[in-house]
Image (cartoon, coloured by chain):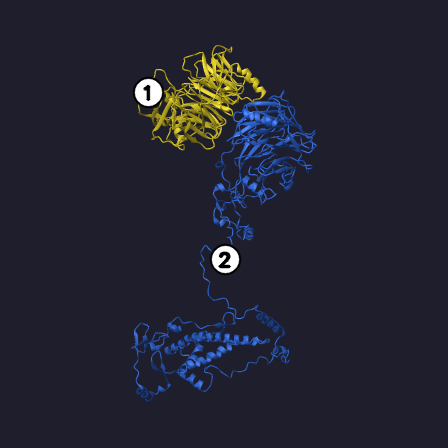
Amino acid sequence: MSSSNDVQSTQQPVVFVTRTAYPLPTQKYMIPTTWKRYHLSQLVNKALALATPIPFDFLVRGEILKASLGEWCAEHGVGEEETLEIEYIESVLPPQKMSDFPHEDWVSSVLCDLQGYLLTASYDGHVRAFDFSKNVVAAAPVHNAPITSLTLIPSTQNDTVTHMVATSSHDLTAAISRLAFDGAAPTSKTGVLATLHLHTAPVSSVSSNTSGTHLLTSSWDGLIGLWDTTIPPTDEVPEPENIGQERKKRRKVEDESKPRRKAPINVLKSHTARVSRVAFSEKQDAQIAYSCGFDSTVRVWDTENGICTHTITAAEKPFLDLAVSPDGNTALAASTDRTLTPYDLRSGSSSLSNTSASFLHPATPSCIAFGRNGNQVVTGAYDGVVRVWDLRSTKGAVASFKAWDGANKKVLGVDWKRGVVGVAGEGGVEVWKVGEEARN
Amino acid sequence: MAASDPQKHSKKRKQVEDEPDTHIHQNAVQLEMLTDDEDGAEISSDDGEADEFPEIDTGSDSEEDFDAEDNEDEDEDEEDDSDGLDSDASLHVFPKAKTVTSDITGKPKRVYPEIEPDYDSDSSTEDAPNRVGNVPMHWYDDLPHIGYDINGKKVLRPARGDELDKFLATVEDPNAWISAFDKNLQMDKPLTNEELDIIRRLYQNENPDASYDPYEPMVEWFTGKGKEEIMPLSAAPEPKRRWISSKWEKQKIMKIVRAIRQGRIVPNKPKSTNKLEFYAIWSDQSSTPHEPPPPAPKPHLPTNSESYNPPEEYLPTDEERKEWEEKDPEDRERDYLPQKYSSLRLVPAYNNFIKERFSRQLDLYLAPRVQRVKLNIDPKSLIPKLPSPSTLKPFPNYKSLTFSHTKGRARCVSISPDGAWAASGDEGGTVSIWEVNVGREVKRWQFKGKIGAVEWCPRTDVCYIVVGIEEEIHFLIPPNLPDSVYLLTKSLLAPATLPPSPATPSPVKWETVSSDTRSIDLPILSVHLPPSSGTPTQITWHRRGDYVASVSTGGSQSAVWMHQISRRHSQAPFKKVKGSVQAVLFHPTKPHFFVATQQYIRIYNLAEQHLLKTLTPGIKWISSMDVHPSGDHLIVGGYDRKLCWFDLELSDKPYKSLRYHTRAIRSVHFHPTYPLLASSSDDGSIQIFHARVYNDLLTDPLIVPLKILRGHHVQDGLGVLQVRWCNRQPWLLSGGADGNVAVWCT
């Protein structure tokens, strides 16, 4: 009896802070040290007097509270008199698998941008569109080689049937294609509109700006191409004359759909090795692009002038993927040394000070997607595990789930929109429901 | 003698007290004479004669001296002295014993006179008025007194008249002529009768002792009845030896003399100095140069159980006692049993005393006399200082992805020059090209037979891979090439106009697929090695990408072929090679060619066509080798687990032999740009070394083991068959017997 009394009697002064939409008045609480997350969440819910209870997670000094408060204090040597500042975030519910979309070949990229539809780009060179009842609404053989990435070109017209997508491929080109969501049967509306000819090595990624006027392609040859999305009436790049016969045959077949051969409007040269990812800024009409490469740099580009405005150089970190937070301040770059490192992109900050703690993965992280709120991010790794991270807690993933029933298959692409995470990879595509934090 | 006379007694005492002085003096004189005598002896010995050392009769000398001195000293008090001498005899002789016939036993016994316990019995208590003692009386010459009496009162100087008074006294005093001056009392005292008697005797040259009888009756020692000598006294003449010096002594002396001459005996050697050597007896550091002997082992202190009256808990129980008694004495934990006695009185004699003393002596005897200095070296300090692996990053440390071959062991791996693609071949005849980063296969060729080797052409303007399959070498063009590269590659491998065939026909046939049946799935060019030459197990490129050398093992024909792509010509560089060739290599910068046979590596100069050097790694069976990109260092791996590092500038013996693997080494490879080295083995592990080569020739190459990569399964005793570094990145590819090709990333 006495011991339980003792335990109950110890209390920890605590101040709650939050960046969510549910702030509490600044006030010191005396919390029994035996309390765990559940009790704290109940306390916050009662204090807020919310109509529907919202589960919260609690971050104590950048670490998610998993055991009781007393155990945490004992582990970190925090005394009873010290006031703890506890940040609470909406807790991520355990991800639930919604459906899977099996593919014959590996899927390199998945897009959840369109409401109710899923766009996938596969290694067999096809771009496919699914609705959530697993029907293929559109499919187009865009490339003869594996497609490495896929992006949606937002159109100004509110056309819900046809959509423009851009793909990049191992066949050294990127392509602008039109997809018509009118059933599985290929129609004349679905097809390649233009091929983008610049690179001499496989194109690693393609990205479109928010207005859909420009595209960026990055390639293994270290170049980044800037393109507009207009379809030219004639070929801008002449067809090579002295090509082999088998290629000519193929060209003849393709002549019927007549994809135009486009040339870039600008080439961004600064990377010294393979550029693995280029991304337009998500801000409206911002002519800023971000890129990362195997030369261990993250670069910020001014696409209008075609110059590199900022370079962050890491040491021996060949970057595989890059994601920029919605506010454009933070870039997350995944590298082959199994880290996911946040970099401060704000101009003026030197490249040295912007490396904080990195998120360690047990396997190579291959793809990153930010949530709607810039605090949470999902990463896919080669061990087939998709992890949800909170940028405020570097110690461990908030949630994780194994795609494809735990088969050790590589995840090659993730996308997180509207509480849905699309996972693409070796085993096809899966869609998981992962709750997103409300934007504050 | 008149012992009651105080004056006489004082004189006697003075005499007694004088004596030690003279003795001391006499000793000093004696010492001097000794040294003189020694000198004399030395001189006499110098001449080589074996003379007897003169014997010094010190006793006689000193006696003479003593007498003479005595006489001189006491010249003026001659009479006094003679008197004193007389009294001396009575004083110094122990009280004479009288022989009395005992009443009880009837036998004669000695009876000593009773010592009277009064003051007179001791001369020291004599009543002398002046008690200053034996001090020179001239100290008191200027004083009115001449000393102090027993009560400390001054004894005043008696009045002394002048010469006239003296003269008158001699006239008036009838005793004046028999009185003498008493120094102590500073006055004339008449001599006693005894003293006068001594003086008279001395005058008459008689013995001063009155009791001395010069005419004592002769004691009949030999005459008379019963005293006759049975044997007469010898009348033999004095033997010669009494007055001839001894021959043996002479010899002994000559020995000493010779020793002195030769310097073995140093005469007048400074004798050990009489000075005492002072030393701090309690200081820790010993004054002698030697270490003090270690202290003897201390005997064990007695414990409670050894007490005669130990507490009850120490007393053995019956079982313990029985057990102790049954045990051999050597096995006993202790050599006694605790016993209890109510009092110390009851403790019997200790019967093991001798034994215990003996064992203690043994302990002391066997105890080490010298403190042995133990060589106490920390084994860690012997390990050479190597930089920590964490400072030598980057190096591969985890398996990023795996590419699986399903049809058999992944024998060979090759990386494209730009480091983006990997080609791997297995024993099932499959050659795959896949992305290094994603592990996705983009092209697969299927052949019949085992793939022995796959190598990517090092040229960057063309792109093709060379595959060695049983007695054939195929040239394959990967897909998705830029047009310019594709066209150049095609024109190189399948030119429209074939180069003129060489003058000497070669047994090797070059065959290009005709343009009609050409397909990406078929090799564009094939080289047919002569039949029964075996599978090419190694293909190595010259750095320019025009020459490629292939090594076939297991065939009966000559194994090494050198193929020139531009001329479509193959030739065997060696007519006859001693031993079977295991591996060949082109030097990265010079026209040198390394050929590894089973035990030797020969370096040939291809331009001048002669043998440059033969390296002997000491490996029984070489499996693989690789040359450092600088061209000055060579590593050789062997099936006997050894990895040898050669500095080609230095020696034909290995600079370093590393034996880290537990099974045969299968493959070694230097990274083309990073200072890294990898070796793979049949134990399924890959070892990564930091191998830094310095530009200055003085610094030795630095080899630091960094990481052991495990992840391949050992199948049929085969582990990791080939390792290759990824160009431009510190990544490693390894093909294993389990059919997996793993990519190891930093």
Q: Nearer the viewer, mark 2 or mark 1?
A: 1
> What is the x, y in percent for residue A268?
44, 27
Chain A as rendered: colour: yellow
The answer to whether residue A320 is visible is: no
The answer to whether residue B15 is visible is: yes
Task: Please give the name of the residue rendered at 57% of the width and 69% of the height, measured from the top-left corner.
Answer: B263
* Numbered label tally: 2
Tell me which corner region of the image, top left, top right, bottom left or bottom right, holds residue B411.
top right
**Relative to the observer, which residue lies in front, A391 or B696?**
B696
- What mark, if any, has residue B289 been given in the picture? 2
**Relative to the observer, which residue lies in front, A8 or B28?**
A8
> What is the x, y in percent for residue B678?
56, 34
Quarter of the rendering occupied by the C terminus of chain A = top left
Q: Which residue is mark 1?
A: A47
Answer few, some or many: residues within 10 Å of disc 1's Cα (few below 14, many 20 plus, some between 14 and 19).
few
**In the image, what residue type sits under mark 1?**
Ala
Tell me which corner region of the image, top left, top right, bottom left or bottom right, holds residue B598.
top right
| B589 sits to left or right of A353 | right
Quarter of the rendering occupied by the N terminus of chain A = top left
> What is the x, y in percent for residue B208?
45, 83
**In the image, what residue type sits under mark 2?**
Pro
| B601 sits to left or right of B400 | right
Say which chain is blue: B
Q: CA distance from mark 2 to mark 1?
A: 87 Å
Q: Are marks 2 and 1 on the same chain?
A: no
| B328 sits to left or right of B575 | left
Name of the residue lying farthest toward the bottom: B171
> What is the x, y in percent for residue B431?
60, 25
